[in-house]
Amino acid sequence: MTGQNVEIGWDAARQANQENWEDRVPLHESAYGLDAYDDPDHLSDVVRHDVAVLEPFLPSNSLSGLDLCHLQCHIGTDTVSLARAGARVTGVDFSPSALGVASTLADRAGVDARWVQTDVLDARSAVDGDFDVVYTSIGTITWLQDLDRWAAQVSALIRAGGTFFIRDGHPALYALDENAQGLTTRYPYFGDGRAQQWDEESTYVGDGKVAHPRTYEWPHPLSEILGALLGAGLRLLHFDEGRMLPWQFSPRMVEVPGGYAWPEAERNLLPCTYTIIARKD
């Protein structure tokens, strides 16, 4: 049953999710349009959007010359883009196949990058050094059960005076029935410790099917996300909510410049994303 709330341990859920993401790699390698990165000026739409928001909060208003750690980097399109925006990049992901594609892409693009395979919840012990910027964006923390542990990793990776950036799907969006004819709530906004079990052979891009369709995600309200980051010692600099997504969450969404949005009459009714920028003093 899609979206069923279940009791499952973190290790079992993490293994299922890793198998699913390993299956996604060749599908996404074909569907992400990697040839575009042969153009040395090409940046992903996600990074082009995020950098414009992030840079005014950086000391020099630029990523140029800063050490940046990209958590849950997948196949590296955004990591390569962040390097082209001027950062010295380290990409972190739990999928060895994804990091293999990321490394090949970086080499092909002439980008110097470091890649570390580890769970994001163990990132501090696996990644050497500390960073001016820790970055994560789009489709990340719903895969994590323990946000306090996640925020502790983020804080520990940032050097004093450094900055954290996240843009992700809004938890209010994830509570909606994506197939309903209106904005109808179906799934929990607030978590209770249980995972949501999903069985889906397709992914958010491309036409192929995965061999391991079962995944587990956790709902995290904004209060939990912000509370975890503040509890880890970060100071909030910026919070925003957006009306557009870089993927089509629902078949009712319409294509707009840079992504997808609800039909115009509904666009102001519900946020699609949130953005948080925080600093470690």
Image (cartoon, rainbow, N blue to C red):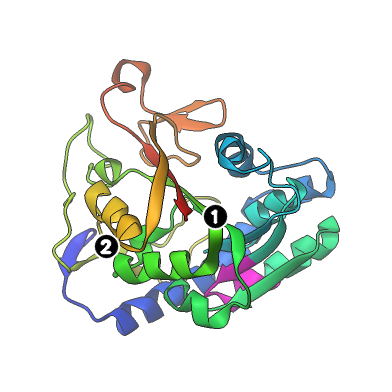
Is 4 situated left or right of 15 in this image?
A: left
Q: Position of residue 39 (x, y in %)?
A: 84, 44
Q: Position of residue 107 (x, y in %)?
A: 82, 64
The local secondary structure at tag 2 comes to loop
- Can residue 65 be seen here? The reply is yes
- What residue did someone put label 2 on? 218
Q: Quadrant of the N terminus?
A: bottom left
Mark 1 crowdedness (10 Å alpha carbons): few <14, some 14-19, many ≥20: few
Specify start and end residues of the magenta stretch as a single range: 91-100
Name which residue lies at 30% across and 51% down.
226
Viewer-side residue, 224 vs 211: 224
Q: Is residue 99 magenta?
A: yes
The amino acid marked with disc number 2 is Trp
Name which residue lies at 37% across and 17% down.
264
Is 124 situated left or right of 239 in this image?
A: right
Q: Position of residue 127 (x, y in %)?
A: 59, 77
Name which residue lies at 34% across and 72% down.
149
- Picture quadrant of residue 219: bottom left
Q: Position of residue 182 (x, y in %)?
A: 22, 29
- What residue did someone put label 1 on? 161
- Residue closest to the far left: 192
User: Residue 39's mark?
Assistant: none
Vertical placement of 92 versus 47: above or below?
A: below
Q: Nearer the viewer, mark 1 or mark 2?
A: 1
Q: Is residue 221 magenta?
A: no
- Picture quadrant of residue 129: bottom right
The amino acid marked with disc number 1 is Gly
The Cα atoms of the two marked residues, 1 and 2, are separated by 31 Å
Mark 1 and mark 2 lie on one chain; the one further toward the N terminus is 1
Name which residue lies at 81% across and 40% down.
41
Viewer-side residue, 205 vs 99: 99
The local secondary structure at tag 1 comes to strand
